């Protein structure tokens, strides 16, 4: 009699919960040892990793997988190098667990503060990119969490080979195997089970396309750390240095079209539009970026008409919508209304303007005189990221080690403090 | 044609979202002015408040409301005093909004840090305790959030009278009326609408019985800050000062039986059980506390047999379950297994023991040589609390002003930093 998917996932969940107690109290040295040993195991297993990946790629080709998906699926030597480098990088990050802050004495005589602790068990659901297996496992391990990883079924052989390396790393550090578990079934019911076990899973991080994230968020009975859209804006204010504005806008759009921090809409103050837009537009056109503008924009430059839908669209492509706004208020209003609360920038030399923009733009990253393309955990100094959250509850913006932890209160007395009485 | 409940709630939601932009950027002085003016309005409206409350009490009596509910419903002069004092207290707290931290320069030249900002719109659902209207409104206002308050229908006249005072306060401070909105309908469909409008409501805080909180959590499409049970433990370790242990355990249980921080289970190390339990039990018996013990406990003291269910039970009553444990490991295991991740204490003079207990007990408050009855926002120095969260995501433990906020990233450049390039 074979085990049902639900029974299988329950078994993983229970094992993860138990393992979370062990990894939660593991020392920094022990966690770093596991990361280093995993890196060494990957390095020693290049042939096995490549062979397993070839199996996945062959099956993918046979099943007519799109070239872009095959590309993401492939474990090139350079990708293996970068997984190894990533593990060493995470090992070098400060351990967030156990830090105490604000231990203040209260009138009763108790001392109260906060200690940073792991979330417990983190479930990661991702598409067929085997390198995510290492990224996610290393961040969760360093932050003291047990992990259940559910990668895309097209990557199953690659993920198993990577999992074997992680198991060697855990074993060498004396940590239980269930600290990192890779879901071994490709049955889609496994995802349904994983996101509805609050007794075993504390948080779910879905990584992938919008469809996956929406489905997971809708059905989950467990908190989800997610980001849906990255409709990012750059607002060129009346007080902008126009050379800087052009440089920043160009980089925000063209550094990479496909990243979530890419600018999708350029807002230009009416006071500078005449001076700014023509040369900006020329630079974008030279690069092959299609421009779509509001009516006033189209009086100044050659652009297709932008529709209401354009302001709501994350192109992730060489297309840019442009709107001329009447000032700071309209820019903020546009961003808060049409944006996705991801990353938005102002170009301005007015301190009063930037102060208002920072306070009032309701986005996970608000930028001043810098391109939105910087929205990234590495660029922010987090060392690594498990994703970018556009939620307001818990983590917001790039999620690194700290976003995989929480704080509990610590209360310390000396035995003489009683509630409702002075000290004895 | 009358407005449907859904249309009515959508109207409140839309108004709250708009008002949240205004209160989110309001100055500390303006928010404090609104709090002070509301306090003055309450003080000047004692007669109206009492009359409105009399209407609710009369209806409650006519409907056969239980005495304990009538008691909670009543707005005595002392309760009005304490609402006024609460408003002044919240006004005196430091404003959490806008603080910047960790603005560190990164290798690219950008400076990255975090700014504390309001959540946006907070929905509060509570039972018929009109004083909660002021507690919740004042905390949300000070933390820069708009609020939609949905109190129990039995308190509708009292809540309207209080809302009128809040409106006067907002008006005097030049803030829009929709910063604090009281749901005026007693139709229960209003709750269903409030918890399923993520476009207008950022977080829901249910305050009340377990039934209410479970219902809200199950049906909400908006994040919920909640606490279900407070099954709190005190563990008397082998290294406890037994006099302190007795003092602390007694206070943890008897300070007030009905608070969520009240001890429900006493865990006693086998090494000290013989010396500790008899006099401890005598003190509890003198106070009228019913004791239920494990088998080993019942060999030492007179107690009813504790069943498996007892370890899972929050009595909120003069009943205590007692278990003798083999040591620290079993105590931690018991607490993490049977507890509700609320507040748990160790009594020990061993630094090694308390260090492990703090790290490994997975509760929102972990206490050392202090009674669990201290679990409270005022005692923790938060100034006030909107509830105690036993969730791990976002706020954990007593939720004060900070728990009603989040942090966004601030990225600052000078126009020369571009992604993927050195400074220009």
Image (cartoon, coloured by chain):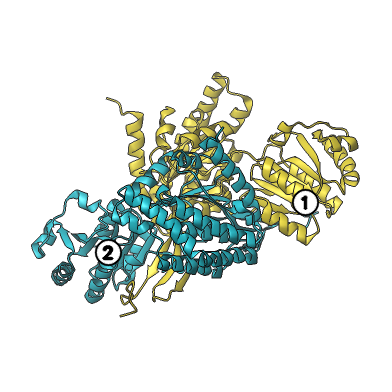
Chain colours: A cyan, B yellow
The nearer-to-camera label among 2 and 1 is: 1
The answer to whether residue A312 is above or below residue B279 is below
Lateral position of residue A401 relative to residue B275, left or right: left
x and y percentages locating residue B330 in the rendered image: 76, 47
The residue wearing badge 1 is B328
Are circles 2 and 1 on residues that touch, CB within 8 Å? no
In the rendered image, residues at marks 2 and 1 fall on the same chain = no
> How many numbered dots are placed on residues in this image?
2
Q: Dot 1: what SS?
A: helix
Q: Which residue is drawn at 47% across and 63% down?
A: A47
Relative to residue A132, is residue B396 drawn left or right?
Answer: right
Q: Mark 1 lies on which chain?
A: B
Q: Quadrant of residue A373?
A: bottom left
In this picture, is B418 found above or below B3?
below
The structure residue drawn at horizontal position 49% and vertical position 35%, both measured from the top left corner, is B218
Q: Mark 2 lies on which chain?
A: A
Query: Is B383 in front, or is A387?
Result: A387
Q: Residue at image x 45%, y 65%? A: A80
According to the image, label 2 marks what residue? Answer: A234
Question: In this view of the protein, can residue B40 be seen by the observer?
Answer: no
Q: Is mark 2 on a helix, strand or loop?
A: strand
Image quarter hosting the N terminus of chain A? top right
Q: Distance between the residues labelled 2 and 1?
A: 56 Å
Image mark for residue B413: none
């Amino acid at each position: 009699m074979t085990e049902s998917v639900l029974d299988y996932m329950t078994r993983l969940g229970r094992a993860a919960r138990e393992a979370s107690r062990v990894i939660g109290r593991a020392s920094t040295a022990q966690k770093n040892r596991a990361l280093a040993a995993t890196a060494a195991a990957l390095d020693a297993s290049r042939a096995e990793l490549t062979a397993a990946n070839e199996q996945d790629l062959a099956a993918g080709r046979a099943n007519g997988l799109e070239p872009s998906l095959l590309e993401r699926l492939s474990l090139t030597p350079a990708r293996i190098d970068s997984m190894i480098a990533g593990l060493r990088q995470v090992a070098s990050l400060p351990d967030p667990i156990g830090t105490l802050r604000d231990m203040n004495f209260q009138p009763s005589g108790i001392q109260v503060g906060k200690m940073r602790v792991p979330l417990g068990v983190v479930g990661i659901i991702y598409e067929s990119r085997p390198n995510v297996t290492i990224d996610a496992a290393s961040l969760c391990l360093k932050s003291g969490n047990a992990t259940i990883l559910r990668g895309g079924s097209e990557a199953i052989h690659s993920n198993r080979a990577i999992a074997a390396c992680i198991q060697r790393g855990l074993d060498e550090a004396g940590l239980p195997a269930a600290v990192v578990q890779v879901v071994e079934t490709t049955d889609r019911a496994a995802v349904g089970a994983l996101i509805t076990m609050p007794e075993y899973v504390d948080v779910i991080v879905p990584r992938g396309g919008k469809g996956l994230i929406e489905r997971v968020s809708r059905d989950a009975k467990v908190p989800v750390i997610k980001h849906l859209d990255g409709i990012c804006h750059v607002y060129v204010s009346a007080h902008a240095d126009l050379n800087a504005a052009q440089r920043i806008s160009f980089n925000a759009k063209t550094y990479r079209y496909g990243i979530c921090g890419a600018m999708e809409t350029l807002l230009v103050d009416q006071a500078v539009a005449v001076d700014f837009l023509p040369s900006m537009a020329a630079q974008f056109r030279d690069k092959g970026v299609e421009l779509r503008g509001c009516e006033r924009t189209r009086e100044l430059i050659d652009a297709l008409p932008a529709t209401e839908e354009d302001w709501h669209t994350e192109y992730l492509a060489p297309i840019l919508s442009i709107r001329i706004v009447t000032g700071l208020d309209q820019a903020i209003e546009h961003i808060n209304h049409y944006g996705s609360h991801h990353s938005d920038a102002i170009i301005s030399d007015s301190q009063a303007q930037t102060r208002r923009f920072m306070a009032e733009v309701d986005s996970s990253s608000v930028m001043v005189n810098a391109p939105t393309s910087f929205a990234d955990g590495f660029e922010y100094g987090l060392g690594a990221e498990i994703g970018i959250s556009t939620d307001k509850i818990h983590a917001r913006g790039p999620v690194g080690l700290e976003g995989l932890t929480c704080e509990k209160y610590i209360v310390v007395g000396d035995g003489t403090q009683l509630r409702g009485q002075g000290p004895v």
